Image (cartoon, grey):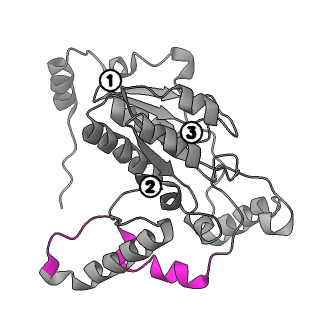
Amino acid sequence: MRYLPLTDADRQQMLGVIGAKKIDDLFIDVPKNALLKGLVDLPKAQGEIEVHRHLQRLAEKNTPAGRTAFFLGAGAYRHHVPASVDHLIQRSEFLTAYTPYQPEIAQGTLQALYEFQSQVAQLLDMEVANASMYDGSTACAEAAMMAARVTKRKKIVFSGGVHPHYVETACTACEALGLEIVALPAAVDDEAAVTKELSADVAAVIVQSPNVFGTVTDLSKIGEAARGAGALMVATFTECVSFGLIEPAGAYGADIVCG
């Protein structure tokens, strides 16, 4: 493919169309003290092996989490990941979240999705499960919008134990639809605060257990209060492995589960 560079006349013509006199006018919104002047002071170029050794030296300054106790939360919990997982997620059926639209040439993918959905429904104690959600935060946003459509209400209440990234993503999607978002302050257990927000215009109460602090909480009372107010209960999670040990969301009455 041939490369045809622009001439100075071409550049001036394009600038003239947008009302600019010079290239610098395109960056007028950037503060002058933030603009780079001159060349970047980079070290001398290195070969692949030199760069590898340099990065290895930097990595050795860190203490691997496996060597000591660590207290990361927000979904980053220490657990064993079988070696087979790395192999399976590289398969074409799982590498992309995109839905196959030609079933006649995607029987293997459809079989994998069926098995996945069956396992997820059983793990979460739900009647059905879907696939093709991009991640937990976008699934949470979809759940909030779904609740609004089902109940014909406009208000979404987030427990203070929900992962903040989930809340932010849902806010971005819901606000564009004119939905009101009530995000309660961060709290390990805010059952009273959540139930206090329930009213006739609440479409859904969104909760999480284990929550962002890593605490397992009893959400059954919130579920009962939500149903009493005509709202749906949406349960989110960041680590599905936890449901191998604790009671799944479907068992305490969650209407929608996502993560």
Quick check: can you spot residue 69?
A: yes
Of callouts 3 and 1, which one flags the residue occurring earlier in the amino acid sequence? 1
Residues packed near mark 3 inside 10 Å, few (<14), some (14 to 19) or many (20 plus): some
| Residue 5: quadrant of the picture | top left
User: Percent from the top left, x then y, of residue 249?
Assistant: 52, 58
Q: How many marks?
A: 3
Q: Which residue is mark 1?
A: 23
Give the mark nearer the N terminus: 3 vs 2.
3
Mark 3–mark 2 distance (CA, rounded to whole Å)? 17 Å
Which residue is labeled 3 in the image?
Answer: 164
- Judging from the image, what secondary structure is the residue with disc 1 in? helix
For the residue marked with disc 2, what is the amino acid?
A: Val
Residue, x 70% and y 52% (percent of image)?
Answer: 214
**Which quadrant of the rendered structure holds the N terminus?**
bottom left
Mark-to-mark CA distance, 3 and 1: 40 Å
What number is the disc on residue 11?
Answer: none
CA gap, disc 2 to disc 1?
51 Å
For the question of whether residue 47 can be seen, the reply is: no
| Left or right: 22 as drawn, with respect to 76 | left
Magenta-colored span: 81-103
In the rendered image, which quarter is residue 127 located in?
A: bottom left
Instruction: Give neighbour class at mark 2: few <14, some 14-19, many 20+ (Cα, 10 Å).
Output: many
Please state which of residues 26 and 106 is positioned toward the viewer in this rendering: 106
